[in-house]
Every structure is written in structure tokens, then in C-alpha cells.
Amino acid sequence: MNHNDTQMRFNLHSNPREVVQLQQQLMDLCKDVGFGELSAFQFTSAAIEAVNNCIKHAYAGEEGYPITLQWRRHQDFVTIEIRDEGKPLPLHLLESPVLSGVDAESGRGWHIIHEWTGSVSYARQGDENILTLTRRL
């Protein structure tokens, strides 16, 4: 397999059980193209956090809605593009995230996503949210 331009597409639903299965597949892909154990864990965890955010926020916890994840390695970068048809992402979340206090019930996810990826971008196209995470090998 030519690792310089590899891609995989995952079609799943807003269902936490499907997310658990996806996590190991992403870890394996990241390690296969040259990420070390820690880097693979961090990038995969950031992507899983983003998918969980789709379920919790964009789809308000409702199961059965579509989420597409496109994993791609191009030269010395890996990108993970996550698409959903839920509510738009509030734009203030894209600004530099502030870590929530230790007693906070939530709010750490965006911090993890930003810390464990090289860059994060968001677009709304029609009725679709597109979140792209990028990390250098």
C-alpha cells in the first residue's frame, strides 16, 4: 500500500457503540502510517471527541443520524474530516479554547481537540457541518 496518499471513509450513525468501534480502527490507521503510540492516541482521541460532540450537541444525543469520517494521509500530514447534518457549531467555540475548571462537567473536549491536533477548521456547507483536524506525522 502506498502510504503517501492513503484514505479511508467511515459511515456511521450517532450511536456511541459505533464510535467505540471506530476508535480502534483510527488508532491502527495512524500507527500504520508512522505515528508513534502517543501521537496516534492523541490524534485519534481528538477525532473521537469531535464525533462525540456531533452526537451530543449537533444531534442533541439522538441516535441514528449520519456522521461521515474521512481519514486521509497526504505526504507528511494526516487529516480527519468529520461531517454531520446536525445543528451548526457555535462559532465562538472555534476561538482559542479555554480549559474548563477541574469541577466542570464539560468543556474539556474542545481544549483536547485543539491541543492534540496541528490545526482545526470548520465550515458549514448547506445543511452540513464539516470539521477538519490535521496533524503532521
Image (cartoon, grey):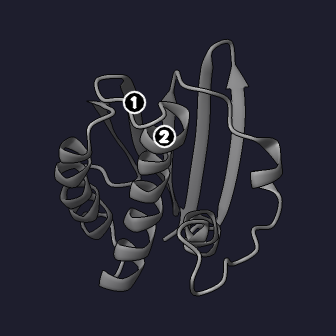
On the picture, is 85 further left or further right than 24?
A: right
SS label for mark 1: strand
Q: Assess disc 1: are there few (<14), some (14-19) or many (≥20) residues with their C-alpha within 10 Å of its C-alpha.
A: many
Work out whether residue 66 or residue 1 is closer to the camera in this orientation and state it.
Answer: 66
On the picture, is 134 further left or further right than 31?
A: right
Q: Name the residue under label 2.
A: 54
Determine the CA span between mark 1 and mark 2.
Answer: 8 Å
* Image coordinates for residue 135, horizontal then vertical, percent: 55, 65
Q: Which mark is residue 67?
A: 1
On the picture, is 94 further left or further right than 85?
A: right
Work out whether residue 95 or residue 33 is closer to the camera in this orientation and state it.
Answer: 95
Q: Is the residue under label 2 in contact with that under label 1 (CB below 8 Å)?
A: yes
SS label for mark 2: helix
Vertical position of residue 25 compared to residue 118: above or below: above
The amino acid type, in three-letter code, at marker 1 is Ile
In the rendered image, which quarter is residue 119 located in?
Answer: bottom right
**What residue appears at the point 32 percent right and 64 percent down from the top-left corner?**
30
* Image coordinates for residue 61, horizontal then vertical, percent: 40, 37
Work out whether residue 108 or residue 132 is closer to the camera in this orientation and state it.
Answer: 108
**What residue appears at the point 21 percent right and 54 percent down from the top-left corner?**
20
